[in-house]
Image: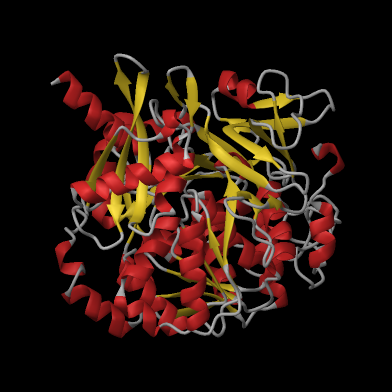
Amino acid sequence: MTTSRPWLKVYSELGIDDDFHVPDATMYQMLAQAGATWPDKSAFFYLGKRMTYQDLLSEVDACAAAFVAMGIGARDSVVLSLPNVPAVVICFYALNKIGARAVMTHPLSSPTELKHYIGVSESQWAVTMDMFYPVFRDLADQSGLKKIVIAKFSDYLSKTMKLGFAVTKGRKIPSVPGKDSRVLMWKDFLAQGETGESTRRWRWGGHGDEAQGAGEAGSPSGEGYQRPITPDETAVILFSGGTTNLPKGIELSSANFNALAVSMKKITGLQVQDSILAILPAFHGFGLGLCIHTPVCLGAYFILVPEFSTEIYINNLIKYEPSFIAGVPTLYQALMSNPKFEKVRFDKLKGAYSGGDMLSADLKARFDQMIINQGSQTELIEGYGLTECVTACVVSPRLHYRDNSMGIPIPGMDVKVALSATGEEVPYGQEGEICITGPTLMQGYIQDPEATAHTLRVHADGRTWLHSGDIGTMDEDGYLYFMGRMKRIIKVSGVSVYPMQVEQVLEAHPLVSRACVIGLPDEYQMSSVKAFVLLADGSTGSDAQRAELIAYCKKHLIKWAVPRQIEFRTELPTTRVGKIAYTELEHEEAAKLAG
């Protein structure tokens, strides 16, 4: 049973220390420590321009003072609706410095979603991009936003890059009208802080305790900065991927993010001035927690990429040769499908991480072989997590991969498979709900005590456990296996069929690149299984291939799980973070039946 934490023997084999201490510091304090310890080292690169830790800290301090000048204080909320541009990083730490909450939203969210985000977080201020001004102008009229700060892609570009941007993409973006009194352009906004009183070179103070960083460096001390909130108070609001209702706002603290940084250092071995390619969005826990805050805590740097395409990703791999990369399975599939990927060298790569969706054993094996051929000494490592615990809480240990397992709990976290109703652990190998506890657990869902009480529950051991809503099993060594979502079970003649299991079988066939499985109403079986398949060669498929895949499934699945229908597609709908949007396929099929 997991009460014995069987994964500790794997830690021992890997030389991982399970001793765990969360820094008594806010996220801003972690940045300030980095600024004091490594002032001239790189904090991040943005489209070729380098920003040092000293530069970043100066910008953050000025931004914090500018927010104060706007009347923003501790426990206020500010919507950040930005791609991966410097403004999102600067605002994130500036708000943390003054104790305000950063409400991280996707800039392409629908107006209905954005209005919900503004309302549930009680935000009166927003920071977004010039191209999204019309949406926020209308939202200001509807939701009472006081001020909208407008950033541009060109704000931190070199003169040459600014000129190039202006004559290509920049000219396509409509100008923001100067007559809107609620609007403040980024440079003008920041100038308010640069001329105001700002603790530009603050020293440790706060609550009388010196902060201890996640890295090796010591902590400066003295008088100056007084942190307005404790590390355990809500500092960030991220939104879960809603399926039927509007997304829930997940309240996370500085301590949650700092704990992740401590744990990931132990798992990855991230060192000072290692680099991470930060193409995952900052409004997602994976991008914000793993690709931005973790390197900040450790004196590493990230490459901030504001726009995603396979071509852009590959160009950044070639230019920067990052130490670590992270992405979703669809990203790695897309990379291997691009002929230019073969030009990338991976001699400096220390780790490649996959999360956000299930990584098939076949995809992992093909990617591993490809990067080994290009100089890599590592492998593609799978993780499992939820935004409710920032991001990853389970990671497959390097060189200890087990087929279709997501790995073992990261240091500081405990995971068990339990009966959903009682929280009682089930025997190894038996299915149950995946439950998680540890220092990265959310504070709760904002303004939703009922959902919070349903998700965060105190078990018989007196600890608060997060009920994930995911079904899984655990083996005797503590390896976790994901079976599917509790709400994503297809009942075929009373038998539970897990779409993820059927997808794994299909994706193991050499014909198949990706698969998505849904349930359809069936007169005799209650439901039947339909699979949507992308073929590896990109073709539209044939009846012979369909028959071959069904025959293959019959060999590897119980009869109730074998797809009754297979539809070949050349593309599948995806969510904003790259997961296959199976609900869209369900809606399509429902519309067909209704029609």
The residue that appears at 59% across and 33% down in the rendered structure is 471
Q: Quadrant of the C terminus?
A: top left
| Total marks in image | 0
**Residue 102 position (above or below residue 66):** above
In the rendered image, residue 217, in percent from the top left (x then y), is placed at 79, 73
In the rendered image, residue 244, in percent from the top left (x then y), is placed at 38, 26
Q: Residue furthest left?
A: 595
Q: Nearer the viewer, residue 549 or 183?
A: 549
In this picture, residue 178 sits left or right of residue 300: left
For residue 321, say whether it is visible. no
**Residue 238 position (above or below residue 131):** above
For residue 255, say whether it is visible. yes
In this picture, residue 235 sits left or right of residue 33: left
In which quadrant of the rendered view does residue 113 lie? top left
Q: How is the image coloured?
A: secondary structure
The residue that appears at 69% across and 45% down in the rendered structure is 440
Q: Nearer the viewer, residue 502 or 133?
A: 502
**Residue 343 position (above or below residue 122):** below
Q: Quadrant of the N terminus?
A: top right
**Residue 319 position (above or below residue 2):** below
In the rendered image, residue 328, in percent from the top left (x then y), is placed at 45, 56
The residue that appears at 51% across and 42% down in the rendered structure is 238
In the rendered image, residue 283, in percent from the top left (x then y), is placed at 46, 50
In which quadrant of the rendered view does residue 159 lie? bottom left
In which quadrant of the rendered view does residue 54 lie? bottom right
In this picture, residue 339 sits left or right of residue 5: left
